[in-house]
């Protein structure tokens, strides 16, 4: 039976190193299967977070050969077998143990976002043409791969000033909701640092749900912030119309 | 099982565990954008060979003060800030330029050069990217002039005709129009800014406009590159004909 070498990070927040494991390869095997083989046969103490193994729970995010990916959606036969396959934890978050990282910062950001609030006197009927575009944002599985790859967090560690693509997607879903009456533009500009995003589209490239994060969420939100804070003509018209 | 000394890679320019040649993504951008910038700068300062017969180079359109009554330098310098600003603030080009020239980041999950402080588009000069829609308004004006030039290119000494230059200028303005009208700002202005299409005035029409602009917007990168090549080639063709290096072939 063919074998592959997995070079897996072993360690915790204090440091660690990669360790090589030889794993037999079966047809259709994904990286998470290989990690389970290691757990079951070679290193029972290997820490891996996973749940559904179907690309829907968003738990098994890691960096496979340097690319942020879901290990359950990364097939072994798509990876070159002539060199060890590196499996590292997500770089942007603190390591807890081995491949498990502490993603709790994301939930703290999430709490800053005002929830859906219906307009006064809302008629609870929604036309399909109004919800088509926000349904895309509901596909998010919160794997946080977009947060991991975003260079504002990954390279510049701006967690205090920046919300990250996952939460721009969530806000886009709320802001474009036909029945929502809240305005989150000031939050986006000031607290969640939308201006720090320089739209280099890595979040879109890694999204396993293929949400067009940059084009459909971030850029429309940037344009809404421009409407409110940077476009003198729009501001003038809004003032004239008393809005 | 065997221990390996490899630790997590430190962040520095180009550090990554990616195995693919990630730099291949930025190399064409550096070459094409760099080459285009040098060519466009030289042509803008040249101030000659920009028109022949009914043809006018897009770098010089609209043609202002060609006789140098009040502007002593090349007429292109009066107008190029418009198209240049539109491209420089374009959401697609921002991605390409930040990656290729500022290496911020050079590619996804690849280390950047160390900098003291990152401010994204929140501080001068990059905060000016927020005025992209104003450059879009200017770009629409330029498109009107370029369509006028393209139609004029069908008339040789008052008679209808078609030369290779006519086709080059017409194709160029078509591609430039597609690039301009696939703009993200237009998508927002057309209807993207609405939360509820069915409740807004002219909501159905704006939904249709938004859908159309979305269709075009999904191909914005393609139009950006095609129009960059076409505008450069259109100018180059007019220069060749105007300088006498080649003769324009009349098709009709």
Image: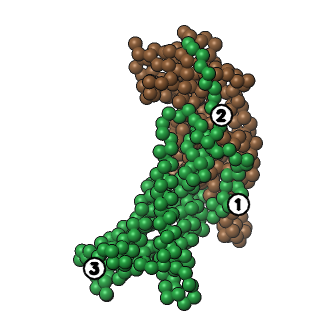
Chain colours: A brown, B green
Residue B53 in the image: state x and y as whole percent.
35, 82
**Mark seen at residue B36:** none
Instruction: Please identify the quarter of the rendering in which residue A97 is found.
Output: top right
Question: Which dot marks residue B124?
Answer: 1
| Whether labels 3 and 1 share one chain | yes
Q: Quick one: label 1 or label 2, which is nearer the N terminus?
A: 2
Residue nearer the viewer, A137 or A126: A137
Element assignment for label 3 = loop
Say which residue appears at 40% left-offset and 13% top-offset.
Answer: A1
Q: Which circle, 1 or 2, is nearer the viewer?
A: 2
Residue at 62% from the left image edge and 58% from the top image edge: A223
Give the vertical position of A129 relative to B2 (above or below): below
Identify which residue, A123 or A31, lies in the foreground.
Answer: A31
Please give the label number shown on residue B161: 3
Residue receiving disc 2: B10
Q: Nearer the viewer, mark 3 or mark 1?
A: 1
Q: Earlier in the sequence, mark 3 or mark 1?
A: 1
Q: Residue at x 59, y 48 (%)?
A: B103
Image quarter (top left, top right, bottom left or bottom right) of the N terminus of chain B: top right
How many other residues sit within 10 Å of disc 2, few (<14), some (14-19) or many (≥20)? few
Q: Pinpoint residue A68: horizontal percent, then vertical percent.
A: 56, 33
Q: Look at 35% across and 69% down and name the residue there.
A: B168
């Amino acid at each position: 039976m063919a074998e592959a070498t997995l070079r897996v990070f072993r360690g915790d927040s204090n440091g660690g190193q990669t360790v090589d494991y030889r794993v037999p390869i079966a047809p259709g095997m994904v990286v998470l299967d290989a990690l389970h083989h290691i757990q079951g046969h070679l290193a029972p103490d290997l820490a891996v977070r996973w749940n559904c193994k179907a690309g829907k729970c968003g738990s098994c995010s890691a960096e496979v050969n340097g690319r942020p990916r879901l290990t359950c959606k990364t097939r072994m036969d798509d990876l070159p077998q002539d060199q060890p396959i590196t499996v590292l934890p997500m770089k942007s978050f603190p390591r807890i143990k081995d491949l498990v990282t502490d993603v709790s910062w994301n939930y703290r950001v999430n709490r800053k976002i005002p929830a859906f609030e219906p307009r006064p006197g809302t008629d609870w009927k929604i036309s399909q043409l109004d919800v088509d575009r926000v349904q895309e944002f509901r596909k998010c599985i919160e794997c946080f791969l977009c947060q991991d790859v975003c260079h504002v967090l990954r390279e510049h560690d701006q967690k205090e000033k920046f919300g990250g693509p996952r939460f721009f997607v969530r806000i886009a879903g709320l802001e474009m909701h036909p029945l929502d009456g809240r305005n989150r533009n000031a939050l986006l500009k000031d607290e969640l640092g939308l201006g720090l995003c320089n739209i280099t589209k890595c979040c879109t490239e890694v999204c396993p749900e293929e949400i067009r994060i940059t084009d459909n969420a971030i850029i429309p939100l940037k344009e809404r912030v421009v409407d409110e804070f940077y476009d003198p003509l729009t501001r003038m018209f809004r003032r004239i119309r008393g809005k | 099982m065997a221990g390996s000394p490899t630790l997590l890679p430190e962040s520095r320019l180009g550090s990554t565990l990616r195995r693919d040649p990630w730099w291949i993504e930025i190399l064409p951008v550096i070459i094409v954008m760099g080459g285009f910038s040098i060519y466009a700068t030289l042509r803008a300062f040249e101030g000659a060979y920009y028109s022949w017969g009914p043809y006018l180079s897009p770098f010089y359109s609209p043609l202002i003060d060609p006789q140098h009554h009040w502007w002593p330098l090349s007429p292109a310098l009066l107008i190029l800030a418009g198209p240049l600003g539109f491209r420089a603030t374009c959401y697609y080009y921002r991605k390409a330029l930040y990656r290729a020239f500022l290496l911020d980041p050079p590619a996804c999950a690849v280390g950047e050069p160390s900098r003291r402080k990152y401010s994204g588009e929140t501080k001068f000069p990059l905060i000016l990217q927020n005025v992209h829609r104003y450059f879009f308004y200017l770009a629409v004006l330029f498109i009107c002039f370029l369509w006028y030039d393209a139609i004029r290119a069908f008339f040789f000494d008052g008679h209808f005709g078609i030369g290779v230059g006519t086709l080059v200028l017409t194709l160029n303005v078509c591609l430039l129009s597609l690039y301009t009208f696939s703009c993200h700002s237009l998508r927002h202005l057309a209807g993207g800014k609405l939360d509820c299409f069915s409740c807004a005035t002219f909501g159905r029409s704006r939904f249709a406009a938004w859908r159309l602009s979305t269709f075009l917007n999904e191909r914005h990168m393609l139009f950006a590159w095609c129009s960059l090549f076409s505008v450069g080639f259109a100018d180059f063709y007019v220069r060749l004909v105007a300088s006498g290096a080649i003769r324009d072939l009349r098709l009709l």
